[in-house]
Image (cartoon, rainbow, N blue to C red):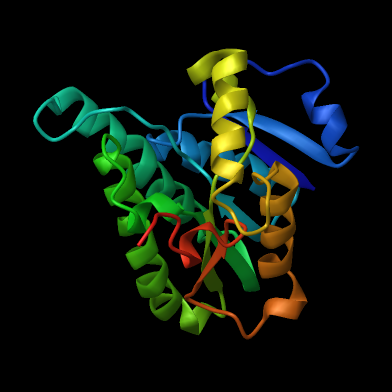
Amino acid sequence: MRYLRLRKSDQLEPDSVAELGANARALRADATKLTDMTAVIDEIRAERGRLDVVFANAGAVWQDTIDALSEENLDKGLEVDLKGTIFTVQASLGLLTSGGAILVNTSITQDMGVPGIGVYAAAKAGLRSLVRTWSNELRDKNIRVNAISPGNIQTDILEKMMGTEGAADYIRRVAAQIPSGRIGQPEDIGNAVVFLASDEATFVNGTELTVDGGQTQIYAGTL
């Protein structure tokens, strides 16, 4: 059974769950509230009795440079990007099986110093650190913990933020900076997640897999 956790504010398209397959189930919850995440795990326990893999993928971005950062946006950013993932993992521990896997979504921005998204990047860097700690803390439970660090991925959020023409221009500019010659697709992240969750990755633990087409491995400027 595959579970898709939705925020209470998310709009679920009628066919979204069906597209994931007959074994998919959507549960609506707020990842920033431990009580909500505990309720989700309790429902999974009642239906299936176990969890084998958890992919914690809570995230949101607010644009603020340090001189303009408000207390509200600081709290929102840390709450969603950091606390939401912590609560997801914490609530899941009692149901994860021995040999199970926890996957945490980080971001290449944690290493890039991109202006305006410092809180988001800091939260993702914090998650990267927690992955190391959790892999050690959960060793006796035989639960692996790894991170996925996506690069630029083409999702609906680009058009929502930039409009159709703006998103198309952004994709062209970014693709020129990527050795693979294209922007990433959601399937690229999905494939990496499946690998780290699989038996082929049982000796991979506490690390971060960067999926960015090589963007962060080269110097894209001029000398």
- Between 108 and 1, the residue placed more toward the observer is 108
Residue 53 versus residue 28 in the image, above or below: below
User: Is residue 51 in sight in this rendering?
Assistant: no
Query: Horizontally, is 104 left or right of 172 in the view?
Result: left
What residue appears at the point 65 percent right and 60 percent down from the top-left corner? 53
Extreme-right residue of the structure: 22
Residue 143 versus residue 30 in the image, above or below: below
Extreme-left residue of the structure: 67
Q: Position of residue 108 (x, y in %)?
A: 44, 54
Q: How many marks?
A: 0
Extreme-front residue of the structure: 223
What residue appears at the point 45 percent right and 56 percent down from the top-left corner? 220
What residue appears at the point 66 percent right and 68 percent down from the top-left corner? 196
Q: Position of residue 50 (x, y in %)?
A: 69, 58
Query: Horizontally, is 10 left or right of 66 in the view?
Result: right
**Res 70 quadrant in image:** top left
User: Is residue 162 in sight in this rendering?
Assistant: yes
Query: Horizontally, is 112 left or right of 75 in the view?
Result: right
Q: Position of residue 136 (x, y in %)?
A: 40, 80
Residue 21 versus residue 132 in the image, above or below: above
Quarter holding the C terminus? bottom left
Residue 64 versus residue 219 in the image, above or below: above
Q: Position of residue 195 (x, y in %)?
A: 72, 67
